Every structure is written in C-alpha cells, then in structure tokens.
Amino acid sequence: MSFLIVSPGKDPKPWVEALKNQHPGLNIYVYPEDHNNEEVEFALTWNHPRGLFKNYPNLKVVASMGAGVDHITSDKDFPENVTITRVVDPLLSEDMGYFVLSLCLNHLRNLGHYQQNEIEEKWEPMGYDRNKDISVGIMGIGEMGKAAAKKLLNNDFKVRSWSRTSKDFDQINNFVGDEELEEFLSETQVLINLLPLTPQTEKILNKELFEQLPEGAYVINVARGEHLVEQDLLEMIDSGHLSGAALDVFWEEPIRDEHPFWKHPKIRVTPHIASVTHPNSVVPQIVDNYERMKEEDPLKNVVEKERGY
Ligand code: OXD
C-alpha cells in the first residue's frame, strides 16, 4: 500500500519529512516520480493535474493539504467513489483570525495611507474610528469564520455574519440565506469574505452586492479569487462607494505584472498568505485518517461532495 503526494508548485519536502516522522513505515511517493498506480490508496494533494486520480484504481481517500477543497471538487473527472478530506486545524483558523484582525486595524488606523505618505515624505494626520464603532460582517461562518469572529469580538469590534444555511454559532448575529443578505450588508462597514468556493458562491462579490454596503465600506477577501468580480470592485472603489480593499486571493495567482490591483492606492495585495498550512501541525490528522482508512473506521473532516465543502 502506498501514500502519494501530488502538489505541483508546492514544495513536498516538509510534508515528506513530517509524514516520515509521524509514521516511519509509510511508503511515500511524490508525483510524478515512478510508482505503481495500483498500490496507491491514499493521496495528499494541492492543485493536482485535472483527471489524474481516475488513473488510480484502488484509491480510497484524497486529502487536501489545506482547508479549502475547491481545487479537488472542481475536477470534473474526480472519481465518484473516492472520499475527500480537508484540514481542520485550530492553529490555521487562528492564523486567519489574526490576519483579518490586522487588516481591520490597518484599515481603521489608515496605515496604508501613512505607508504611501512615508514614501512621498508627506506629514498628513487623519482622523480614525474606534473598533467599538465599526461593524464587521463576515460572510461564511465555518471554522475560519468563527475564529475570525472571535478575534474581532475580543478586540471590541461589532461583529455580524452571513451564511447560506443556518449556523450554530450563537455569539453573534447571524443572517441566513438570500432573504437576509440585504439586511446583513446594510450595516456592514468592513466586509470579510470567508465563504467556501462553490458554484453558488462564485462571483458573489459583485457590483450588486457592493451597492448594498454602506458608503465607504471596506472589503477584505481572504477566501478565493473566484468569489470576486474584479472589474466591479475597481469600479466601486473608483466611484468612491467603497473606500478600498485588501485582497489575499486572486483568479490568477500570482497576478500578472500589469494587473491594475498592483498599483491601486486603495487596494492592498498579499500573496495568498492569510493562513498557510504548517505540515507539522496537520500531518497528525492526515496520518490518523490514513490509519482509519486502513482499519475501515470512519474518517474525520470528510467533505460533503454535494455541498462542495
Ligand atoms: C487553504 C488555503 O484552503 O491556503 O488552506 O487557501
């Protein structure tokens, strides 16, 4: 029985090392090195070549290296009988919480403005709002969304959330479904997107949605580039309806050289680093699922394929 790692564009070495430490007997192959497809029962992946897994007749489980699984579920040739799992790591969620908190504080205290002014040697103090006076709206209240909400609440922000289906998180006011979206948006001064990417949520951050935010609202996208209609965001910032945006994810990563986001004074770009999986921290749960698969025990963090997350 073999364990396959498929992660083009991502260095597999720390994963191999962590897996070997956790489970010295594991027979690991890193795609595309030579291996027998029939022996592979478990694969760990990030951005696999489309259609690859249908060539593994005995594959049982494909584990995502991260919290997101859209890179797997979007593969139309993914074998139906293979289980998909994702990473659920409190530390990863906490990293996301700290990141969105720092973006909110940066925005509130105008640090982007001062950074630019420093380059231009300009002394130009600005007024600022206090955390307690700002209402932050989180779209998507899964593990990451909850962690973000807690960090923001602990730092005195007013927090509300929106999810497509009802969620059991009672610490904040949660709005549900299309019917309550308008109400959710109407008082959201900083919008944070943490939705999973599914056919229902693709391009959800569009002009129609932005128009329902109050004048001067700020947008943070830390989920997936495909949630955002880029042109709509640019238009709404340039018209003054939105005050700016912080973007960590993009349709195309890295974004191309002349992309208008790079030089836009009101858009902050980071290279998909909001919360990055640390192999040592998540390998124990992957090995645990590998053992469960062998023992035919129920796996943990299984993705509902119909739902897409
Ligand atoms: C993830 C990511 O889904 O890094 O884990 O985006």
Image (tube, rainbow, N blue to C red):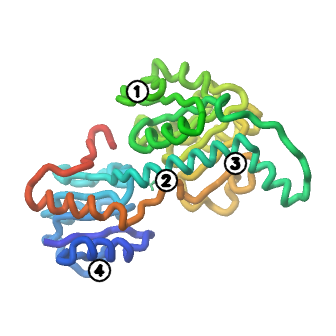
Residue to which mark 3 is pinned = 267
> How far apart in space, not on screen, are marks 1 and 3 (Cα)?
33 Å
Between discs 4 and 1, the one toward the N terminus = 4
Q: Would residue 75 be seen by someone viewing this image from the given angle?
A: no
Tag 4–tag 2 contact (CB < 8 Å): no
Q: Earlier in the sequence, mark 4 or mark 2?
A: 4
Label 4 or label 2, whichever lies nearer to me, is: 2
Question: Residue 163: percent from the left, percent from the top?
Answer: 43, 30
Q: How far across and down, in percent of the image, does residue 197 sit?
A: 42, 43
Among the two numbered marks 1 and 2 on one chain, the one whose residue lies closer to the N terminus: 2
Give the CA separation, mark 4 to mark 1. Answer: 49 Å
- What label does residue 95 carry, if any? 2
Q: Which residue is mark 1?
A: 170
> Distance from label 4 to label 2 (Cα)?
33 Å
Amino acid type, residue under disc 2 in the picture:
Asp
Q: 10 Å neighbourhood of mark 3: few (<14), some, or many (≥20)?
A: many
Q: Between residues 153 and 195, which one lies in front from this camera angle? A: 153
Q: Residue at x 31, y 51 (%)?
A: 76
Looking at marks 1 and 3 on the same chain, the residue that comes earlier in the sequence is marked by 1
Q: Amino acid at mark 3?
A: Ile
Q: Is residue 214 above or below residue 104?
A: above
